[in-house]
Amino acid sequence: MDTGTKISAFAHVALIGWAFFGGTFRSEPLPMAVQEVSVITGEQFAAMTAQRDAPDVPTPTALQQPETPEDEVVPPETVEEELTPPEVVTPPEPEPDPVPDPVEVPPEPEVVEEPPTLEQPEPVTEVLPVPPGPEAQPRPADKVAPEPIAPPPPEAQPDEVETPAVSLDEGAETQEEQQDQTAPEEATDEIVTEAEETKENAPRTSPRPRVRPNRPAPPAQPEVAEEQEQTPPEPAQSDTAIDDALAEALGQGGEPSGPPLTSGEKDAMRLAVSKCWNVGSLSTDALQTVVVVGFSLTQDGKIVGGSLRMIDSSGESAGAAKQAYEAARRAILRCGAKGYTLPADKYDQWRDIEITFNPERMRIK
Amino acid sequence: MMRFLTSLLLGLTILAAPVYAQSGPLRLELDQGIIEPLPFAVPNFVPDGPAATQYANDISRVVAADLTGTGLFREISPEAFISRVSSFEAPVQFADWKAINAEALVTGAVSVSGNRLTVRFRVWDVFSGQELGNGLQFAGTTDGWRRMAHKVADQVYSRITGEGAYFDSRVAFVSESGPKDQRQKRLAIMDYDGANVQYLTDSAAIVLAPRFSPTGDRLLYTSYETGQPRIYVLDVDRVRRTELATQDGTMSFSPRFSPDGRSIVYSLIQGGNTDLWKMDIASGQSVRLTNTPAIETAPSYSPDGSQIVFESDRSGTPQLYIMPANGGEATRISFGQGRYGTPVWSPRGDLIAFTKQNKGRFHIGVMRTDGSEERLLTSSFLDEGPTWSPNGRVIMFTRETQGASGRATLYSVDISGRNLRPVRTPDGGSDPSWGPLQN
């Protein structure tokens, strides 16, 4: 073989070898999308397919959901109906759950009517604000959803502009805002109902004096406590207001006025008196009489002489009220003979006490 | 300069004002107390001389017994007294009475002048140191010392409880003596506590169901002395009786006065049928109030005289009914199990007492006038015939024990069901009728 042939043969071998081993024919792996597969229910699948169908136009369908919420926005009514439970306000959050249900239903009709409804959006939005007042609760929404009219309006909104997924959040926010508004309505409604309930409690509170009566001038014992009680009303009147204020300040110098009594401390005082409140010898009329008795205590818990007085009574008979008051007075005096045990650092809180004696539960039928 | 310092001082005062301002008095509400007899003390009344000593002691004991007997009061034994009341006018040492926990104190004085007895007394609220009401004085003959003691007790009771009392009242009843098969019955009258028993009839004839007039001066009762039941009116003071006009061939029983005392309502058996009738005492004219084939009996007026409660078996078993005082449609008010009888309207008008027989037991009970809130107060082999105290707080009735040696006794019970106690009488007693408070 001549040299040319050898060179040619070598070149061909080299070329072939490069072709095979040089990677010329290797192809890089094509990009592949990996998708995880999970088991889904038939309903979910149907929902997914429905949404796919919707996309053609109704991508808004998902947005329409806000409308059902808008229907939910109506809550004010729910608020009105649910007078008693103020907490009911929380339910609005669960509303999103009900939303999906209506969503499934509407989509189908949407497919058919969507095109026409596109133009109606505006009227729909107008309608929405109106219903809020009269419309029903979120649950009633189920009833509303089935109605053919309800679904179309939702579609209208998405058409307007606000289609982004954000709409869900916005819808939620608007709901919250409206709920905030409704909350006060609930409160007012509740107050009304509570007022009716409070009628039952009326006897407990009504006998209490709204205005504190003037205390009888202490004859013998010019105690500090009494002076203070007399001074408060005066300062605003005369020219000696400053002097009175100073006197008051000086007088109060050593009297502690801590925080209000705790419920436990009040219960202890209540118990201390109730142990001596003997209604066993009272007439049936006196047992139907509620009396409010006021008195003052010294710093060591003893009753200020002459401070006991009947402030109010509920009975029809003055005689019965007198007997009821005397029984209450005996209770206060007898159990307070050695002084009531009350927190000394809160003297200003219990210097004056008014006790309502209500024998209703101890009545002989 | 002075003004500046004053302002400065005032400002500092305001700054130093307590953080926790007291807006008003501490307000508490009590709805639970205790129910127990109120402890009281009755030191022996102070006699003005040796002749009054026994009366003073006796009156003090009767006053204490009256109050204790109600179950609403508890006497503190004189042995526990710290101080002695030696003078009616001397100031009371309240500290001594507080020390023994006496909530009420009764002090008094007794004077005797010949046959004349005078009692003075005061009632004190020990813990408030105040007098309840004003001092009061009663005067009478020495024979009436018990009545004066009852009147003192009445005042104490009213001043503490706020309702009328019943100590100075009398009870008419049938005194029973002898074995059951030969029981002798006499009409009798006594103080409410069983003292001073007086017999108004002998035991020659059976007498039943005495009923006081509203003023307490007359008694209605039924006697079998002619062999047939007849109604008589007895003048209590003169012990003189009158037979009410009756129709031939009839038997009348179970009479009761109207609240105005001018007429009576009673049962009349005519032709085998028992109905209610009303008779005008002055004219003797009778009017039929019911006309049914059933047995109607035991009528009792409401305090205002507008209605009558009675017993009838028109429904098949004896039950209680209410109808207008002049007759008319009756309304049944008892619907519980058992048989109801002898209804009596409370002087307060709010309750009706009755006898109930159920499951072999007898009960005395009370219910509202519409039949609601029925409450049985007693239970025994045989309880019957309730009668109200003048203040409507206590019921007296007959309790009979079982067997041939069984004995009828008077008992009293508070309308709350508490304080059930026998009334002491020389012999057995039945059919009580509680009269009004005496003047």
Image (cartoon, coloured by chain):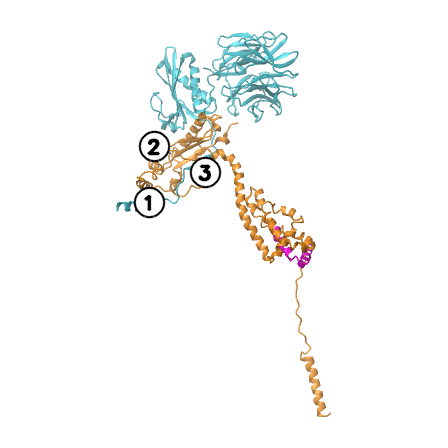
Chain colours: A orange, B cyan
Query: Which residue carries the number 2 mark?
Result: A218
* Image disc number at residue B97: none
Q: Give the x, y percent position of residue B68.
A: 46, 22
Give the percent coordinates (x, y) of residue B120: 38, 18
Find disc 3 in the rendering and name its residue.
A267
- Residue B126 location, x and y as percent? 39, 27
Up-down: is B303 above or below A306? above
- Residue B243 in the image: state x and y as whole percent: 56, 7
Give me the chain letter of mark 2.
Answer: A
Q: How many marks?
A: 3
* Residue located beneath label 1 in the image: B13
**Chain letter of disc 3?**
A
Predominant secondary structure, magenta span: helix
Q: Are marks 2 and 1 in contact (CB under 8 Å)?
A: no
Which residue sits at x=53%, y=47%?
A181
Residue lying at the far right of the rendered structure: A1
Residue type beneath disc 3 = Asp
Is disc 3 surrounded by few (<14), some (14 to 19) or many (20+) residues within 10 Å?
Answer: some
Judging from the image, what secondary structure is the residue with disc 2 in? loop
| Residues drawn in magenta | A43-68
